[in-house]
Image (cartoon, rainbow, N blue to C red):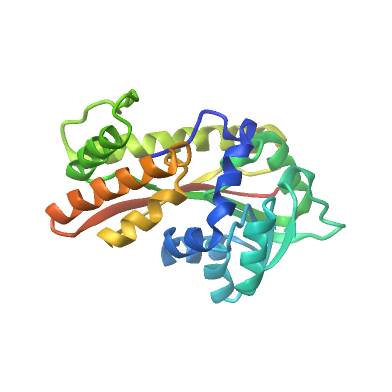
């Protein structure tokens, strides 16, 4: 399931929605698996990191907990303020415009945020700020709803906005294929990211990252995360309330909870 447009960095105002509910975003959004954190630290030559589009610090805190020094770069002041309150040093800027003031870093990471950065300009900035053999690591949490819940989402949307056309993803004959479809959506973003990295001529061939994990969501936990994903922001408040109420009832009918299969995917490359 994805709300990514083909070139999100050209429509950055969409990202400003997230700062409206920074506390909810931080509370509800999933973190990243330990295996990813360990692999990135293993590949980096040291533990002085920059986190691009750090948001509220969801992607930064696991690296801090593993002993890294992390500087966040975040364009939204509201998200940055929240992250500072959780102990992260944050500088407010779009990454392409950010002034590193002559500093160099062992790794530049970005969790579920690089799609807001111009892939070539961003990669060039990374090359400028990395120490020799420094690392760029970009990653996202990819997921697809269980098929029964995907159907419930569509029904809830039609209930909330009866006259609106609903764009359905291509039908899949199994949950495995549905998850593969979702991951392909995210993979397209990393093709563009890898192209930007290649064009700089400053990095080794990107390594693919992939780590699978599961999380169980209760009804209330899933309803809490939905407003942070962007897909409901265009709805009027009453329509959003109808959607959430209808979907909540459907989750109750399915047993009140469900297991989400995640695949954290991404790429990593080393500065030459």
Residue 48 is drawn in which quadrant? bottom right
> Can residue 49 be seen here?
no
Residue 110 on image: x %, y %? 59, 52
For residue 141, side relative to residue 214 (left or right): right
- Residue at left 39%, top 50%? 226
Q: Position of residue 263 (x, y in %)?
A: 36, 50
Residue 96, visible in the rendered structure: yes
Quarter of the image with the N terminus in it: top left
**Measured from the top left, where is residue 198 in percent x and y?**
64, 35
In front of the other: 48 or 133: 48
Q: Where residue 58 sits: x, y (%)?
A: 52, 63
| Residue shown at the point (64%, 74%) measured from the top left | 87
Front position in the image: 269 or 23: 23
Most foreground residue, 264 or 198: 264
Q: For the point 62% across and 58% down, which residue is it? A: 79
| Residue 201 shown left or right of residue 14 in the figure | right
* Residue 142, placed above or below residue 24: above
Question: Toward which corner of the image does residue 74 lie, by quadrant?
Answer: bottom right
């Amino acid at each position: 399931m994805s709300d990514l447009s083909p070139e999100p960095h050209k429509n950055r105002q969409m990202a400003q929605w997230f700062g409206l509910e920074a506390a909810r975003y931080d509370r509800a959004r999933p973190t990243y698996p330990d295996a990813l954190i360990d692999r990135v630290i293993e590949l980096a030559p040291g533990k002085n990191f920059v986190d691009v589009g750090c948001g509220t610090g969801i992607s930064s805190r696991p690296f801090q907990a593993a002993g890294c020094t992390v500087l966040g770069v975040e364009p939204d002041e509201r998200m940055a303020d929240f992250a500072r309150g959780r102990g992260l040093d944050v500088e407010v800027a779009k990454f392409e415009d950010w002034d590193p003031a002559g500093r160099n870093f062992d790794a530049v990471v970005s969790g579920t945020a690089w799609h807001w950065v111009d892939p070539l300009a961003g990669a060039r900035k990374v090359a400028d700020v990395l120490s020799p053999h420094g690392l760029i690591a970009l990653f996202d949490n990819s997921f697809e709803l269980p098929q029964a819940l995907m159907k419930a989402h569509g029904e809830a949307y039609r209930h909330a906005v009866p006259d609106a056309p609903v764009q359905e993803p291509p039908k899949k004959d199994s949950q495995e294929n549905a998850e593969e479809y979702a991951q392909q959506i995210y993979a397209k973003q990393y093709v563009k990211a890898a192209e930007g990295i290649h064009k700089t001529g400053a990095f080794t061939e990107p390594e693919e990252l992939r780590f699978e994990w599961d999380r169980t969501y209760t009804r209330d936990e899933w309803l809490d995360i939905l407003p942070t994903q962007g897909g409901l922001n265009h709805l009027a408040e009453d329509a959003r309330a109808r959607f959430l109420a209808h979907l909540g009832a459907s989750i109750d009918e399915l047993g009140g909870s469900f297991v989400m299969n995640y695949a954290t995917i991404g790429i990593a490359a080393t500065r030459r």
